[in-house]
Amino acid sequence: MTNPSKLRLGVNIDHVATVRNARGSAYPDPVRAAKLAEAAGANGITAHLREDRRHIRDADIDGLMAALTTPLNFEMAATEEMQAIALRHRPYAVCIVPEKREERTTEGGLDVAGDDKRLARFIAPLREAGSRVSLFIGHEASQIRAAARIGAAVVELHTGAYCDYHYAGEVDQRDAELAALKEGAKLARSLGLEVHAGHGLTYETVAPIAAIPEVMELNIGHFLMAESLFVGMEFAIREMRRLMDAARNA
Ligand code: PXP
């Protein structure tokens, strides 16, 4: 994405589509949200085309590819259907995530270590097509090493447990998660991987993650869309950007 020296913010616009689909209406349009996010300083847009199309739909991906001026980070499960869609669009980045139909959101990281041969075969054509392949994983060393081994360019570390512990008031577990994320980021970087992080991040939880020097990009969606209801998308994104920069430069 644009400025390599600065921590980048990828804005996930999935939940604009969630609101649209709740009423089966034509609005709100996730592409319009993505353009607003770009204008507010997003360095990229993230969208997850789920197998069940519960939020983003195929036509949204067409619209995003046509309209964006920043890179699209296309999140998808490691299925043949999604691979074909990614190969048709050749987005800047493809982030492979685990997906279960019954989950409300992406609950854990990919098991790269346990599925390395299949995933290596799966990502090879995506890499050849020019997309940067990212794997959404937990901070376990075995997963990070496996991601490097199979040729991913990027790992996105799952910050969901850290955020959940924070809001549950379980400070010791939260701090242990944070320490593990820091170690994971260090290991990933030492193996030549670019490090991203995301899931569940909010104004309250973003600073310690933004302060991890190896982390180059945060992907944030649900909280930003929720906060936009009260303060507007531009303010919400600018405030998140301000908190990220303050933590990074502290
Ligand atoms: N990163 C990845 C890989 C995700 O799957 C998600 C959720 O779609 C996010 C980041 C953003 O999480 P949230 O919407 O909780 O900010």
Image: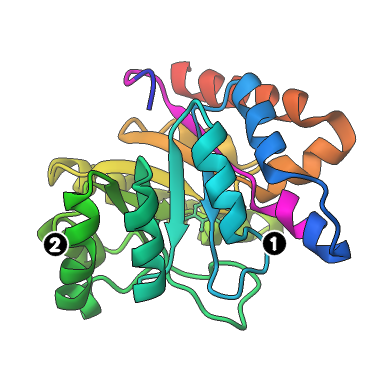
Image point 53% across, 73% down: which residue? 51
Q: Is residue 201 left or right of residue 248?
A: right
In the rendered structure, find residue 150 and report the number of the disc placed on it: 2
- Please tell me which of labels 1 and 2 falls first in the chain: 2
- In the picture, residue 82 is in which quadrant? bottom left
Question: Magenta residues, as a range?
Answer: 4-18
Residue type highlighted by circle 2: Ile
Q: Secondary structure at mark 1?
A: helix
- In the picture, residue 37 is in which quadrant? top right
Taking depth in this image into account, of 165 and 137 the one nearest to the observer is: 137
Q: Would residue 202 be counted in the magenta stretch? A: no
Taking depth in this image into account, of 115 and 89 the one nearest to the observer is: 89
In the rendered structure, find residue 168 and report the number of the disc placed on it: 1
Picture layout, residue 76 above or below residue 51: above
Could you say where residue 81 lies in the image, as x and y percent from the top left? 40, 73
Picture layout, residue 221 above or below residue 84: above
